[in-house]
Amino acid sequence: MPLFRRPTLLFHALGWLIFLSLPVLFVNRGQGRDFLFPLLTSWQFWLFLLVFALIFYLHFYLFIPKLFFRRQFLAYGLVFGAGLLLVSWQQPFDRLIMRHESTDRPFGPPPGLNERPERFDRSDRPAPPPTRRDSGRESLLDIVSIMLYLMIWAIGLAIAIAQRSRQSEQRATQAEADKARAELSSLKAQINPHFLFNTLNTIYTLARLNHPACTESIMKLSNIMRYVSDEVREDFVLLEDEVACLRHYIELQELRLSKKTTVKFETSGDLAHQQIPPLILMTLVENIFKHGVSNREASVIEIKVVAETGKVLFYSKNRIFQNTPESGRTGIGLDNVRKRLEHIYPDRHLLRIDDDERFFIVNLEVNT
């Protein structure tokens, strides 16, 4: 419960300023300004304030964290009761007011007493205002002091409970955020080996065939691996970097495709000023080449990436070939994409997948 912070200091200063005005409300209004001003400027009044401030801060910084929050309610109740008995016994407010009432009376005889002593009759002398001591009795209870004690005790407890509740909510929120980051890191770790494994298979095939584009493909793979190893650590990357990685990946895949497969890859919009989580689009494209390619049947693969103001759109369409070698792993990448989108863009994305057993169509809209 830190005190020496600017908002906290202002809050405490305002609270004690209000507290300063409360005793004035309980002072006899008939006393007037001639009584209130000496009262408020006396050292006894500031000592009175200091005592109640000490009670508040001992309660707030010692008794509440050490007793109340540790469920030592019996000890906490005993401390509260002891403080209440002490205030009731000492009667600080009544003592303060009585002290100033006694010093506020006019001193010396009334005017004219020394001039005509023979004509002055003590029976005609106006009686001074009665005070607690003049009445011959003192109040059994200092109601004002008791009310002030109960008020600062209740306010301190309410503030401490509110701060405790807010800190609990902040810790819960932080725990959820840490859990989400851990899950995202786990999902990224699942994506990288899978993606690199497929790409290396492509390079291996080119090397066995002594393909002339093998050297260039190794350079493209190097660029992809650099992107995956460097950018995947970030929460967001530039859309143009993700698209550049897509382009290298598609070009690598085209090297092993037959002439029966046609790939149409289109981009539009301002890619340099949009951001997106890394490997989101790459996972969708990778899924296309896993399940939408056949060496015996003709097929067309369509991929579009569009950047609009505050929005990124992705569209893909490919035929479905059930006898692909990796058909047994269908859905792992797409599940990861769904989970990452739910974590990063809750209620700000739309992922629609249409599968009619002939064509596989993906529409993704992300509101950045």
Image: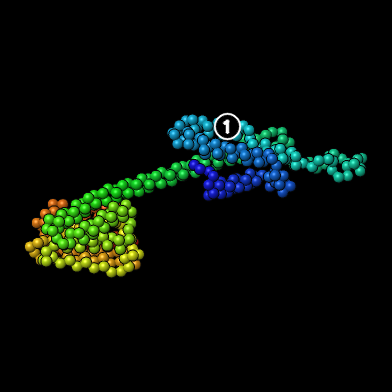
Which residue is drawn at the image coordinates 22% and 50% (left, top)?
Answer: 193
Tell me which amino acid carries mark 1: Leu
Which residue is drawn at the image coordinates 27% and 48% (left, top)?
Answer: 186
Vertical relation: 105 (above or below) 317: above
Q: Quadrant of residue 248?
A: bottom left
Please provide percent x and percent y for residue 75.
Answer: 49, 30
Q: Quadrant of residue 264?
A: bottom left
Relative depth, front residue between 357 and 90: 357
Relative depth, front residue between 61 and 219: 219
Q: Is residue 216 left or right of residue 121?
A: left
Vertical relation: 177 (above or below) 91: below
Q: Is residue 150 visible from the viewing direction of this image? A: no
Please provide percent x and percent y for residue 318.
Answer: 16, 63
Which residue is drawn at the image coordinates 92% and 40% (left, top)?
Answer: 118
The residue indicated by pointer 1 is: 85
Q: Is residue 214 visible from the viewing direction of this image? A: yes
For mark 1, give the secondary structure: helix
Dot 1 crowding, Cα within 10 Å, few <14, some 14–19, many 20+: few
Relative depth, front residue between 212 and 337: 212
